[in-house]
Amino acid sequence: MEAKRLAIPEVVLLTPRVFGDERGFFYESFNARAFEAAVGVQAKFVQDNHSRSAKGVLRGLHYQLPPHAQGKLVRVVQGEVFDVAVDVRRSSPTFGQWVGAVLSAQNRRQLWIPPGFAHGFLTLSEVAEFLYKTSDFYAPECERCIAWNDADIGITWPFEGDPVLSGKDQEGVPLAKAEVFA
């Protein structure tokens, strides 16, 4: 597995070794030892989630506060998305900064987003199936949402027009007003 630390070094882009021939392909989508060696974090994932989204759907920017802060290991098994992580740790030198990467079924990349980061993605293909592991269970009382278009964060989403948002995502707050990590 190849690991590339992004501009915010706690966020890691992972590319698996793929073995393929005329029959198809094989790769390990998760291996705890390889993940720990690549990311430097001992993995304890407790929940797997699977979503399907149409083109132009934007989900996020979501995160959970302690005591149920979540790390996420995300990937796409059909289609393509632009995936984003935003540092919401007030004491961090990269607070309010974002990193993004294209994840697709074709490139098979995964993104490790540790606790303390908001997460979102935009579907670029006609449809995308998105899988992710979380390091803590979903706790609605701890969930928060930052506005996807907060000018202070300045995410450069690769689309024109307005994305398709859920009601919850339409009510995301600016980072300046959000409850964040210390």
Image (tube, helix red, strand yellow):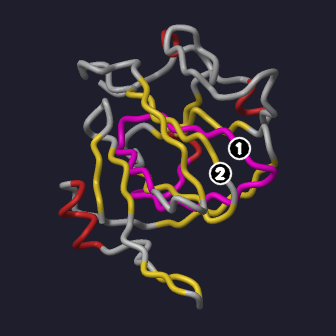
Q: Disc 2 vs disc 1: Cβ atoms closer than 8 Å?
A: yes
- Packing grade of label 1 (10 A; few <14, some 14-19, many >=20) is many
- Packing grade of label 2 (10 A; few <14, some 14-19, many >=20) is many
Which sits earlier in the primary sequence, circle 2 or circle 1?
Answer: 2
Q: Give above or below for 1 relative to 53.
A: below
- The percent coordinates of residue 80 (x first, y second) are 65, 51
Q: Type of residue at label 2?
A: Glu
- Range shown magenta: 110-139
Residue 113 quadrant: top left
Taking 49 as reference, is 95 left or right?
left
Taking 115 as reference, is 158 left or right?
right
For the C terminus, the image quarter is: top left
Total count of labels: 2
- Compute the Cα span from label 2 to label 1: 6 Å
User: Mark 1 falls on what kind of element?
Assistant: strand
Residue 75 on the magenta segment: no
- The percent coordinates of residue 91 (x first, y second) are 24, 20
Q: Give above or below for 66 relative to 15.
A: above
Q: Residue at x 34, y 19 (%)?
A: 95
**Of residues 162 and 1, which is closer to you in this image?**
1
Q: Give above or below for 32 relative to 13.
A: below
- The percent coordinates of residue 49 (x first, y second) are 59, 62
Residue that lies at the very extreme toward the bottom in this rendered image: 23
Q: Residue at x 65, y 23 (%)?
A: 172
To which residue does mark 1 refer?
Answer: 123
- The percent coordinates of residue 121 (x first, y second) are 61, 40
To which residue does mark 2 refer?
Answer: 80
